[in-house]
């Protein structure tokens, strides 16, 4: 960071509330000490501890493991779908619901949203069994919410064992959902043309966690001047292990390629 541009503070979870004995600079690991260090050394990089956050994630991981066992027992493949708001998650699920592949699949969806069940209603209108999970203040789904969604799906007469693919639309957000394992088999992240080719670099944790990246809204690529090679280079840098599929939910282009990856 250039001198005189102000302090840089990063919030990075650490294992314990106390600094390890061997830590060469324990001042940088306590919020109060970090505050003091910043007053003494404006511009210093300081790491804060968030042990409560770690505990919450450990609790979530245990529930995710229970979900995973439930999915395995039912023989259903589960996909967790992440993207920024408006990148086309619900439109992709609508398109999959209406798509008629050569080898048909039985699908259902859980749909996370802060405040409405609009997306679940859209999916039901498209012929997909869908349960809305309203998260209130939470900017992501967690494994316990998904467990309740599964109960609701099954109580509504759709046993998991009858499904080939369960699609979980996460809350539109490129930050928070990445940290929460839901017990899924695959993580799918959308990057819409027109939202910015540098999004993978700006939100690396989310894109790095992807098994599949869908470049969405490709029917709009020319209109918005989408720089495909630049986007692919950024994805290659951040998510080298992810398969990339280019899809238009409007035209249906790419849906068969995507299903071949998700089956
Ligand atoms: N032209 C075109 N428009 C699309 C496509 N996919 C989605 N859209 C449009 O983009 C807008 C947002 O799509 P949604 O599917 O609601 O996006 P979302 O990611 O589910 O949004 P949140 O649930 O709010 O996070 C809607 O107006 C869609 O019609 C596509 O492939 N092509
Ligand atoms: Mg949606």
Image (tube, helix red, strand yellow):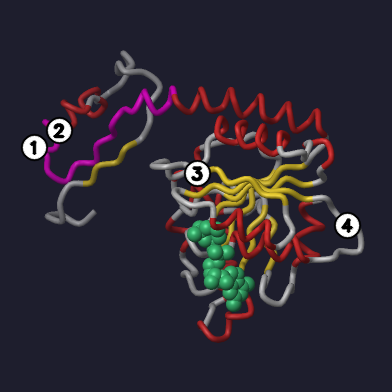
Residue at figure coordinates x 54%, y 78% from the top left: 226
User: CB of mark 2 within 8 Å of CB of mark 1?
Assistant: yes
Q: Residues within 10 Å of mark 4 (few under 14, many from 20)?
A: few
User: CB of mark 3 within 8 Å of CB of mark 2?
Assistant: no
**Along the viewing direction, whichever of 39 and 85 lies nearer the viewer:** 85
Q: Secondary structure at mark 3?
A: strand
Disc sitting over residue 35 in the figure: 2
Residue at figure coordinates x 82%, y 45% from the top left: 164
Q: Is mark 3 within 8 Å of ligand 1?
A: no
**Along the viewing direction, whichever of 2 and 60 lies nearer the viewer:** 60
Q: Secondary structure at mark 1?
A: helix
Mark 4 or mark 3, earlier in chain? 4
Is 29 situated left or right of 216 in this image? left
Disc sitting over residue 39 in the figure: 1
Q: Tell me the CA gap for discs 1 and 3.
A: 42 Å
Q: Residue furthest top?
A: 21
Residue 192 position (above or below residue 175): below
Q: Position of residue 120 (x, y in %)?
A: 60, 53
Q: Is mark 1 within 8 Å of ligand 1?
A: no
Residue at figure coordinates x 79%, y 58% from the top left: 259
Q: Is mark 4 within 8 Å of ligand 1?
A: no
Residue position for label 4: 104
Residue at figure coordinates x 55%, y 34% from the top left: 145
Residue 261 position (above or below residue 228): above
Q: Residue 66: name its quadrant.
A: top right
User: CB of mark 2 within 8 Å of CB of mark 4?
Assistant: no
């Amino acid at each position: 960071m250039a001198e005189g541009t102000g302090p840089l503070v990063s919030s990075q979870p650490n294992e314990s509330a106390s600094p390890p004995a061997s830590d060469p600079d324990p001042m940088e690991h306590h919020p109060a000490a970090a505050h003091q260090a910043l007053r003494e050394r404006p511009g210093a990089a300081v790491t804060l501890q968030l042990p409560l956050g770690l505990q919450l994630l450990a609790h979530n991981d245990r529930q995710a493991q229970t979900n995973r066992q439930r999915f395995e027992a039912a023989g259903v493949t589960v996909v967790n779908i992440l993207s920024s708001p408006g990148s086309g998650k619900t439109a992709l699920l609508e398109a999959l619901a209406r798509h008629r592949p050569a080898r048909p699949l039985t699908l259902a969806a859980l749909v996370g949203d802060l405040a409405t069940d609009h997306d679940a209603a859209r999916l039901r209108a498209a012929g997909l069994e869908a349960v809305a999970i309203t998260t209130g203040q939470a900017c992501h789904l967690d494994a316990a919410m998904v467990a309740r969604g599964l109960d609701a799906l099954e109580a509504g007469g759709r046993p998991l064992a009858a499904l080939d693919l369960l699609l979980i639309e996460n809350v539109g957000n490129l930050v928070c959902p990445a940290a929460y394992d839901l017990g899924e088999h695959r993580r799918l992240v959308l990057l819409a043309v027109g939202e910015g080719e540098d999004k993978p670099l700006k939100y690396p944790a989310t894109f790095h966690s992807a098994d599949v990246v869908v470049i969405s809204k490709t029917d709009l690529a020319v209109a918005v001047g989408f720089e495909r090679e630049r986007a692919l280079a950024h994805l290659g840098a951040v998510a080298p292990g992810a398969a990339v599929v280019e899809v238009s939910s409007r035209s249906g282009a790419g849906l068969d390629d995507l299903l071949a990856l998700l089956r």
